[in-house]
Amino acid sequence: MIKNILKTAVIFLIVFFYSCKQDNSKNKHIKITQDTETVEKVPIIDPKTPVDDYAKQSVDDALAEKLKIYISTQFLNKEDLNIISDNQRKFQLYKIDLNNDGENEVFINFLTSYFCGTGGCTLLLLNNNLELITKFTTTRTLFVEQTFQNDWRVIMTESQGSWRKLIFDSGSYPSNPSMEDITNEFPSGHAEVLFDEIYSKAKTYLF
């Protein structure tokens, strides 16, 4: 009699333990399924960047059309255009008043391997009449300060791992930042950032 009771008790414990194990397995399965469903419901982000995401000073379709003509007829020659493939003819623009005269100067940032190297890309600075002020060689992101020297805003940029200060003088900014003296100063928090993919994304045009 006692043996039968013990046997029944052992069987009951085995069944109870197996049932608990099955419940835990179901719970784990449900949790995994829920996690999978959560991952599947993550929205897919449209890779196309809306215009609102661009720096407003970099969006001017009418001006871009004029710059296309300038680039193709005045800045580049036929030999240049023959070398640059159609899908590499990219540029960005940025309008900014550098000398506080109420009229915007225009930066042109080129995005082709023809104009870019390890130190950055060629930039042009034009006046309001689309006349060349400065051709910058291998320049990175620009930080245009609110301070003035010689009646033009001070520009800072990084070259060869060091900060350089570009001061307007004799009708132009220095064309090669790497030739300027290294400065211990850094861009201020009030500087206007130009041509930076994170802080000042510019719209890209084709010429």
Image (cartoon, rainbow, N blue to C red):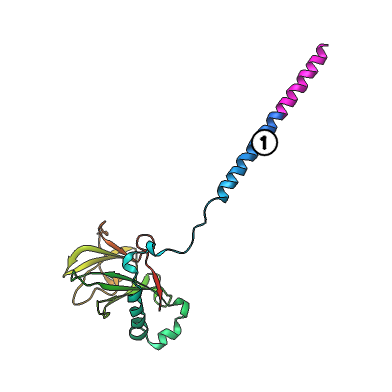
Q: Residue at x 45, y 83 (%)?
A: 83
- The quadrant in which the N terminus is found is top right
* Residue drawn at x 55%, y 50% as measured from the top left: 41
Residue range corresponding to the magenta coloring:
1-18
Q: Is residue 72 magenta?
A: no
How far from the left and from the top, in percent, is residue 107? 30, 72
Residue 14 falls inside the magenta stretch: yes
Between 146 and 168, the one nearer to me in the picture: 146
Local crowd size for mark 1, using a 10 Å CA cut-off: few (<14), some (14–19), many (≥20): few
What quarter of the picture does the C terminus occupy?
bottom left
- Residue picked out by circle 1: 25
Q: Residue 160, image x and y in percent? A: 34, 66
Residue ranking furthest to the left: 150
| Left or right: 97, with 36 as reference point | left
Residue 118 picture location, percent across and down? 40, 70
Quadrant housing residue 124: bottom left
Give amino acid for label 1.
Ser
| Identity of the residue drawn at 26% across and 60% down | 191
